[in-house]
Image: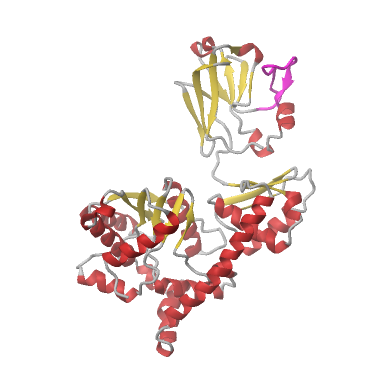
Amino acid sequence: MTFSAASLAEHLEEFEQLAGKPSRYVIAFSGGLDSTVLLHALAELKKSDPRYGNTPVLAIHIDHGLQSESHQWRDACELTAADYEIEFRSLRVTVAMDSGKGTEASARDARYAALHAELHSEDWLLSAHHRDDQAETLLLNLIRGSGPAGVAGIGDVRRFGPGWLVRPMLNVDRKDILQYATSGGLRWVEDPSNTDHRFDRNFLRHEILPRLASRWPDIAVRLQRSAGHAGEASQLLIDLAEIDLKGLGSRSARLPIDGLAALSKARQRNVIRYALRDRGLSTPTAAQLERVLDEIIPARVDEQPLVSWSGASVRRYRNRLYLLAPDMSEVIESAAISGMEHELGVGLGLLRLEPGADLGLSPALLDDGLMIRPRMGGEEFQPFGQAHTRKVKKLLQEEGVVPWMRDRLPLLYAGERLIAVGDLWLADDAVTRPGVAVRWIGRPALH
């Protein structure tokens, strides 16, 4: 098919039947041929079609830092977005070269994690993948021994964090995208790594697919058809995972061990992969997932095993499996509180003091200044509503706070007096009515 702004509009309208109208279009903009054409076509729609004129568009460029010219590409992307009158943002990511997945897959994980973090509710993340990309992906995944989801290749629309990941050019051939660009006089960035045959995808693109096309000219269409069949099978697995997750309590952040153990190994793998994706975490390799099944699920209840990889980690505590993001500060730093909010560190949120609560800390304590300190061990105080002094360690055990969060709890002090443990307990002798509430905003899971 010939690609145009009008054909792009047709595809976007089709996707609205599933995803509803987007609050914003966010384009993954590498500056290469494909994403430049997508950005230009959408910019044309915004100018010519009132249905698109009022929907904000943001182009996000991901700098992987893998090429010495990456800063030049970033500058070129910014100029292109400015020419098209599109808002632009550049994000630098760190690619985990030791992930065991290879450079291409690790870069993709880092890229999508960064894009995931930028999405707002009902945003559409638009990706410029096309039919030839689909063919390459299917072959690559077959070679890697992927299951149905991998053989399904690239889907055209799916939930992605708070929004949707949409690929409106998936039925377009590369030659049609090139024709659009050349006829419109567009300029784009050429990444020299795209011709490096050491990368598997480039080898398939430049060596294998042309040979297949010489025998079967419609090879990309045939492979796309196979991907569609595999996509249906993959969707059935997603449906099964949703059923299993509901049976496990519908909380993707933590899964009951007993419930998991009652499932077959295949269903355990399926629901864990689904839960990780639901949380926006990277999925493990087959070997890493097997470690979860073999080391964590059958572990003794008093053990605390850990399996981690780039972008996620899995822990066990008591009878639950926890799926966690790895980016979290190791400790709380001691600091005086200035103002009514205090940042606790990466992934730990912030502590907020809110006057006017029905019950809270005495406002007089704030006048003398408060300190946040990490838990060192041996702390004790009398929680509000309890008759005796208690050790904080014992309180945390009774509350079922997961061990890896116990040393990350912010302890609030007035002088040398412990007056609050996060937003879990206030000291009995520090409470007044009305008072100042302690809120832990963005608190990681504690139970």
Depth order, front residue of 333/1: 1
What residue is shown at x 69% (from left), y 64% (from top)?
Answer: 266
Question: Residue 186: percent from the left, percent from the top?
Answer: 22, 66
Residue sitting farthest toward the bottom: 215
The spot of residue 10 in percent (x, y) is 33, 64
- 89 left or right of 229? left
Q: Nearer the viewer, residue 192 or 268?
A: 268
The answer to which of 306 and 173 lies nearer the viewer is: 173
Identify whether 182 is placed above or below 302: below
Residue 229 drawn in magenta: no
Q: Quadrant of residue 331?
A: top right
Q: Which residues are magenta?
A: 376-392
Q: Is residue 277 visible?
A: yes
Judge left or right: residue 2 versus residue 375: left
76 lies left or right of 61: left
The quarter in which the C terminus is drawn is top right
Q: Give the left or right position of residue 252, taking residue 16 as reference.
A: right
Q: Quadrant of residue 217?
A: bottom left
